[in-house]
Image: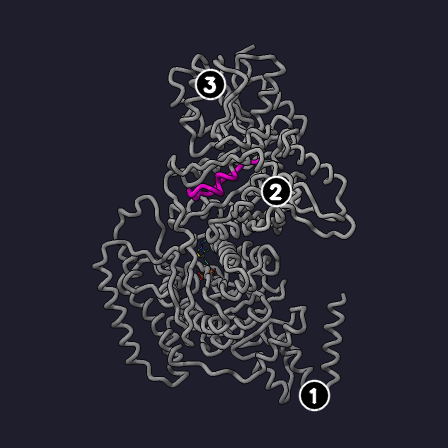
Amino acid sequence: MARSKTATNGTTGVLDAPNGERERVFEVFRRWGYLEADLDPLGFFHPPAQPELQIEGEAAREARRVYCGTVGVEFMHIPEPERRRWIQERMEAPPSEVDQQRVLDQLIRADMFEQVLQQRYLGTKRFSLEGVTALIPLVDEILDAAGQRGAIELVMGMSHRGRLTVIVQVAKRSLEDVFARFEDVDPRSTLGSGDVKYHMGATGEYVTRSGDKVHIHLVSNPSHLEAVDPVTIGRTRAKQDRAGAGGKEKYLPLLVHGDAAFAGQGIVAETLNFSDLPGYTVGGTIHIIANNLIGFTTTCRESHSSVFSAQIARRQSIPIFHVNAEDVDAVVRIGRIALEYRYQFGSDVVVDIIGYRRQGHSEIDDPTITQPLLYKAIKDHPPLWEVYAEDTGIDAQAQAQQIRTELETAQEQAGSISKKPTLRELPKYWDGYKGGRHKPEYEVETGLSREELAAIAERLTVYPEGFHIHPKIKKLLEQRAEMGNGSRPVDYGMGEALAFGSLVKAGVPVRMTGQDSRRGTFNQRHSVLVDIENEQEYVPLQNIAADQAQCEIYNSTLSEAAVMGFEYGYSRDYPETLVMWEAQFGDFANVAQAVIDQFVSAGEDKWGLLSGLVLLLPHGHEGQGPEHSSARIERFLQLAARDNFQICQPSNGAQYFHLLRRQALSSWRKPLVVFTPKSMLRHPDAASPIEDFSRPHFLGVVPDQEVSDAKRVLLCTGKIGHELRAERRRRKDTSTAIVFVDQLYPFPEAELTAELERHANAREIVWVQEEPANMGALFYMLPRLRNLAGERSVLSVKRSASPSPATGSAKAHELEQKTLLSLAFATNE
Ligand SMILES: Cc1ncc(C[n+]2csc(CCOP(=O)(O)OP(=O)(O)O)c2C)c(N)n1
């Protein structure tokens, strides 16, 4: 309320001024002018007419020239008056000079590049930029302005359209190398792996008009439109964090979107929502919409319910500049204003360049079938460089011929390249890390001495004098202190805190985000203490030692896809950090399935890019219904191949501690999927004696210490194992071994073989899981167990196959669980 009052007063103040009438006219145009701006080069796009703008007079003519020309700006929704004023001043100032010769050169290069590709590789998909080639001079101007503001790197995310042109003209990779990709040289190097050419990442060096060098980092990208957005932002944030002070000025994120994707893909809104949040902000992202007013065969009218696809950004203090992509000088000028706005206010900004798509969606697509009239108009329309040459009066024919020859020569030379060219260099900070198959020498010792543990526990359980602690937290900290000194078994919550504390103390940064992660969904973490009298915060993990590394734990937005994508991106540029994303319940991770499939699982295979991201996924059937039970173990196991990641379910607090430390300390950098407990968080059976934290390693298989030489071996993972052991106690059974498989993938074959050897006389090996038969680890374990079992029979106990992971009735769950336990012990009765 207070905000809108101020705004109204501000407007009234303007109306009272001597030139009030002129201002009143301008105000109307500032608000609605963009709807009558001349934005579509082909004239097919018609926003609703605005009767308010039908004003006569000198002021109206002037305001119309500014706000209804080839630029239409939406900024009156921005609540901060100084931001509106800033934009208004720039829009109403005289236009700046543009280096037209440079612009022309870029336009010719962009269009000619596409034409040579079209001629030489007819029928090959390249997703031509023609129709929105103004993108190239726009990025050039943004880079020039950014260089002057101290930017040293542009982190760029974009999808298919124009990507190859960008790799050549912005990332400055050689033409020969890009043409060689079309030649598809060296196919044996990518048998069964690799990616298509218009998804590959690229790095390079850009020299701006002012002579500044800006490093370009074009992020590798999957087909899944816009999925790269949060990844790009996460990468930028990591680079900014590495740089420390001034990081937000040095690393600039830029996202290029398609118009249909920008409006249609929810992950765009999720990513925009990061813009001003402490855990995620990058000091403003530049968004460019390469808007050809079509998505594949779908028109704008079918693509979005808003007039412009860009308007999803209107919910935030983000200005949207729509520019006719055929007025390249205007595009360039707006590029500078957008960049300045980002640096001035640390805000996102959208530049929507509106053009057309000269070819079909890809070059093998005939658009005259679905949009015959539009494509008739496009066919008759000259390429942008010709339009620009005519508008500016520069004779471009000789220049065009020379560029064409240059491109054709490069294309011919590409034929003699025999090795697949790499288009990027990895930053130095990846030097010490390894991917590929696991090797025993990658294992590291993860145990700590009792003294070290006690010292960390002490720091974790104290708070400043005068801090008004919540009584429940006081008790929790007292219990944790007892865990630390060995007088109480250590639960998961404390196991995790000890892992984090030990890592930051040793100089390894820790970053975790997820919904309600600071407290922990299950009230288990309490990483931030809140003073009950003044809500001041105290974070014990940031007070472990004077020279410790950062420990950052943030509550995330209520998003999975974008937040997981962001953290994946962060892990890509901060390999030294233990980076974790936590699901509220593991079930919800499937909202981020595209990020899991395209980046976490396949990133190394497709692009040779490593990540140490940890996914923490609460899992377990506890009668909480179909969507609070399963983190879909089966899906992760199905994705597992060539040691692409690790999939674990630690069965107790000490195992969790060792697992997290192994992830942070090993030079083998692979994503880690952890199925984490819910009810077992505080269960005494899953707490560990402090001695177990001094053990050297995480155990892939947790042997049964109570039974040796069993008649039957029950193998399981997670909570069900504890239930089986309780059932065994109840039955006073001494002949059944219950063994936990804490690491599902890579398969701990040697450890499991050793454990089965200890029970060489067991006739039956039984895989027991609480998941339905078509879910869980069953499909994965059975063939592997059969391989190890030799003559022994391998059986399984599980719920019946089901389309949904769990029942909605708590009582039905209990009945099912009881049956499961009885079946597991059945042959012993
Ligand atoms: C998530 C997802 N859904 C569908 C597709 C298939 N697809 C590829 S490009 C495209 C149209 C994109 O239109 P737009 O965003 O306007 O970009 P343009 O191709 O016009 O530049 C579609 C539907 C995809 N790649 N990703």
Question: In the image, what residue occupies the spot 73% across and 76% down?
Answer: 10
Along the viewing direction, whichever of 751 and 791 lies nearer the viewer: 751
Percent across and percent down for residue 749 are 41, 27
Mark 1 — residue?
A: 19
Question: Which numbered disc covers residue 584?
Answer: 2
Mark 3 close to ligand 1, CB under 8 Å: no
Q: In terms of sequence position, does the residue under pointer 3 or pointer 2 come before the other?
A: 2
Going by the numbered disc 3, the residue's amino acid type is Ile
Residue 274 is inside the magenta segment: no
Quadrant position of the C terminus in the picture = top right
Disc number lying in front (3 or 1): 3
Percent across and percent down for residue 465 are 74, 47
Going by the numbered disc 2, the residue's amino acid type is Gln
Q: Is residue 169 above or below residue 576?
A: below
Q: CA distance from mark 1 to mark 2?
A: 57 Å
Q: Is residue 673 visible?
A: yes
Q: CA distance from mark 3 to mark 2?
A: 34 Å
Question: In the image, what residue occupies the spot 60% across and 71% down?
Answer: 74
Hey, which quadrant is residue 391 in on the image?
bottom left
Using residue 10 as the reference point, say whether residue 85 is left or right of it: left
Percent across and percent down for residue 676 are 57, 36
Along the viewing direction, whichever of 265 and 440 lies nearer the viewer: 440
Category of crowding for the residue at label 3, using alpha-carbon neighbours closer than 10 angstroms: few (below 14), some (14–19), many (at least 20): many
